[in-house]
Amino acid sequence: MFMIILVINIVYVSFFTIRMILTLKGYRYIAALVSMVEVVIYIVGLGLVLDNLNEIQNIVAYAVGYGIGIIIGTKIEEKMALGYITVNVITADIDHTMPKLLRDKGYGVTDWSANGLEGNRSAMQILTPRKDELKLYDTIKQIDPKAFIIAYEPKTIHGGFWVKTVRKGKLFK
């Protein structure tokens, strides 16, 4: 019974985590389908625990399964890598070699001159699918190991070169 409850709760919470992420990313219909499976698993698992509430190991299995489910759900979401990220990069490279190298790899780069505490800088904004996030960081670090990098997930994207190129999957990397 312990293992059944543990596995059921791992699966339930993994579905729960994925559903929440899908909802936050705007995939409401897929999230609704996932939630239907999730609630069935939840009812079965909770029913098993409540029917055997006098056995402490079942409660422990439920709690441990919940924690493991969170970890597995977030790992699955990392592998799914839904959506896009925007990366802002600031570098001391004022001759603009980095924007050109990134453009040659297919990234859409908007760059401009900036001023920092220690003088002139080059600033860039890059949009990429989340699945390519780590490759982009590696590329930036290879070009300039001291580059300052900030990444965030944009809520809305509309228009421009980035959207047309990135959505068509035309990054060369």
Image (cartoon, rainbow, N blue to C red):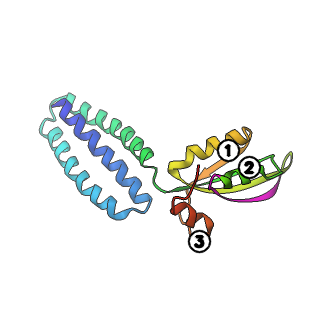
Please, is residue 66 above or below residue 32 in the view?
Answer: above
Q: Secondary structure at mark 1?
A: helix
Q: Residue at x 16, y 45 (%)?
A: 44
Q: Which mark is residue 159?
A: 3
Residue 20 lies left or right of residue 142; in this view the side is left
Q: Residue at x 80, y 47 (%)?
A: 93
Residue on which disc 1 sits: 140
Q: Secondary structure at mark 3?
A: loop
Amino acid at pointer 2: Met
Residue 21 lies left or right of residue 131; in this view the side is left
Residue 114 is situated, as x and y percent measured from the top left of the image, at 81, 56
Q: Residue furthest bottom?
A: 159
Residue 25 is situated, as x and y percent measured from the top left of the image, at 44, 59
Amino acid at pointer 1: Ile
Q: Residue furthest left?
A: 51
Find the distance from the CA under tag 2 to the CA under tag 3: 24 Å
Ranked by sequence position, the earlier of labels 1 and 3 is: 1
Residue 49 lies left or right of residue 168; in this view the side is left
| Quadrant for the N terminus in the image | top left
Residue on which disc 2 sits: 98
Residue 122 is situated, as x and y percent measured from the top left of the image, at 79, 53
Q: What's the magenta bit mostly, secondary-structure-wise? A: strand
Ranked by sequence position, the earlier of labels 2 and 1 is: 2
**Residue range highlighted in magenta:** 105-115
Q: Is residue 61 magenta?
A: no
Please, is residue 142 above or below residue 109 in the view?
Answer: above
Q: Residue at x 24, y 32 (%)?
A: 61
Please, is residue 49 above or below residue 24 in the view?
Answer: above
